[in-house]
């Protein structure tokens, strides 16, 4: 079988959530199914590390696709011609985009549809594209994968898709997320937090991540409680970050907030493991990979209680409303001062994390492919 795959988000040193999903699943699927040929379709020069095995043929299909008009050109015109040329039996896309102009069976992994519920959080043209095309992609796909039961139910109810057409392929965690010794933790504190203990947030900076709410919560925490601890924010700017900058600039305790920017994965693993707690209260999540990474790093978690978050954390986090900043601040204090509570959360995380792995994800994605070609 000739399996064509959209791999345009496999970017060396720039893997985000969907990129990691793509990397971890395809690395396993290609190795475990040597009887099939895989055609990896990139939109720019690729790194040879992404050619995982001998049954992978990389193809560069220009132009680079980072604009709605170029998405249309790539998926509606360039992709159909290429699929025909290589004799593809199925097209797999792990980032939600497929082609409306081919009759080849397609597997579409739609991670979430936040853009339907919060279109104002995206640039106008991007929001227009997502809301015009993704409903059509969902109906066109032979089978859909998604990353949580929450997202499955949301896709099915919003787009009118039958549940049998959607398979949940939960995310996993990178194996490098492991606990650190106390001496190693102090090295990270010295490097990123002026030697002090710290809370951490990990994620691309955008409105849906509610970094403004986290900053408000941390300000309340510092005003109300006597705790000498910092907040380290890890992640690059995605879009509409002006409000984050405004809130930060007006904080009394802004010197206790460190924006570390985007970190390489090896470094990020250490920062997660060195933190006192992952503080993660996004307004909307299809899964929330940092939650799982925190469990493997054996770091306590403060989490929101909406969308997919309760499904992922189970009882392994202190949960509250993402807009109840006083409660978030109170939970920060509890984690900061109650060692037994923190250890209890970590132990519950050890049990909860067993539900998720990239091997399980790849097996479920392979099931999506098999269902698509039947």
Image (spheres, helix red, strand yellow):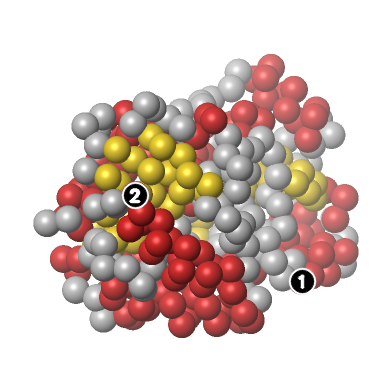
Residue toward you, 317 or 370? 370
Tag 2 and tag 1, C-beta contact below 8 Å: no
Q: Quadrant of the N terminus?
A: top left
Q: Is residue 92 visible?
A: no
Q: Residue at x 55, y 82 (%)?
A: 128
Q: Residue at x 29, y 51 (%)?
A: 87
Q: Secondary structure at mark 1?
A: helix
Residue 45 image position (x, y, % from top left): 61, 42
Q: Is residue 62 visible?
A: yes
Per the model, the C-alpha gap separating discs 2 and 1 is: 47 Å
Q: Which quadrant of the view contains residue 12?
A: top right
* 230 left or right of 202 in image: right
Residue 188 image position (x, y, % from top left): 73, 28
Q: Residues within 10 Å of mark 2 (few under 14, many from 20)?
A: few
- Mark 2 lies on residue: 86
Q: Residue at x 85, y 55 (%)?
A: 254
Up-down relation of residue 12 to residue 121 (above or below): above
* 353 left or right of 60 in image: left
Among the two numbered marks 2 and 1 on one chain, the one whose residue lies closer to the N terminus: 2
Residue toward you, 278 or 167? 167
Q: Residue at x 44, y 70 (%)?
A: 76
Q: Quadrant of the C terminus?
A: bottom left
- Mark 1 lies on residue: 243
Residue 8 image position (x, y, % from top left): 52, 51
Residue 259 image position (x, y, % from top left): 78, 49
Up-down relation of residue 242 to residue 47 (above or below): below
Numbered mark located on residue 179 in the image? none
Number of marks present in the image shown: 2
Q: Most extreme residue toward the front, as rendered?
A: 85
Q: Secondary structure at mark 2?
A: helix
Up-down relation of residue 46 to residue 167 (above or below): above
């Amino acid at each position: 079988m000739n399996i064509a795959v959209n791999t345009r988000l496999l970017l060396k040193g720039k893997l985000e959530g969907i990129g990691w999903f793509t990397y971890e699943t395809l690395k396993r699927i290609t190795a475990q199914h040597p009887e099939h040929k895989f055609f990896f379709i990139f939109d720019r020069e690729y790194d040879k590390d992404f050619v995982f095995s001998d049954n992978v043929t990389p193809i560069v299909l220009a132009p680079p696709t980072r604009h709605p008009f170029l998405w249309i050109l790539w998926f509606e015109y360039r992709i159909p011609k290429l699929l025909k040329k290589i004799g593809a039996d199925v097209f797999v896309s792990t980032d939600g985009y497929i082609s409306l102009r081919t009759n080849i069976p397609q597997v579409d992994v739609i991670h979430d549809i936040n853009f339907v519920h919060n279109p104002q959080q995206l640039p106008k043209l991007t929001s227009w594209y997502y809301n015009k095309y993704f409903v059509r992609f969902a109906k066109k796909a032979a089978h859909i994968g998604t990353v949580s039961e929450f997202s499955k139910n949301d896709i099915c109810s919003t787009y009118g898709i039958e549940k049998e057409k959607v398979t949940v392929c939960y995310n996993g965690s990178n194996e490098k997320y492991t606990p650190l010794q106390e001496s190693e933790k102090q090295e990270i504190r010295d490097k990123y937090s002026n030697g002090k203990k710290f809370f951490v947030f990990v994620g691309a900076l955008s409105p849906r991540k509610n970094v403004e709410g986290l900053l408000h919560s941390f300000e309340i925490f510092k005003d109300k409680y006597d705790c000498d601890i910092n907040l380290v924010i890890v992640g690059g700017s995605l879009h509409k970050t002006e409000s984050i900058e405004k809130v930060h600039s007006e904080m009394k305790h802004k010197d206790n907030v460190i924006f570390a920017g985007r970190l390489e994965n090896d470094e990020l693993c250490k920062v997660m493991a060195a933190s006192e707690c992952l503080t993660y209260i996004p307004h909307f999540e299809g899964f929330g990979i940092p939650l799982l990474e925190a469990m493997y790093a054996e770091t306590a978690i403060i989490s929101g209680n909406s969308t997919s978050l309760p499904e992922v954390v189970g009882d392994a986090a202190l949960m509250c409303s993402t807009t109840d900043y006083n409660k978030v601040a109170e939970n920060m204090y509890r984690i900061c001062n109650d060692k037994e509570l923190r250890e209890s959360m970590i132990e519950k995380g050890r049990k909860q994390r067993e539900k998720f792995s990239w091997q399980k994800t790849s097996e479920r994605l392979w099931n999506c492919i098999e269902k698509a070609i039947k």
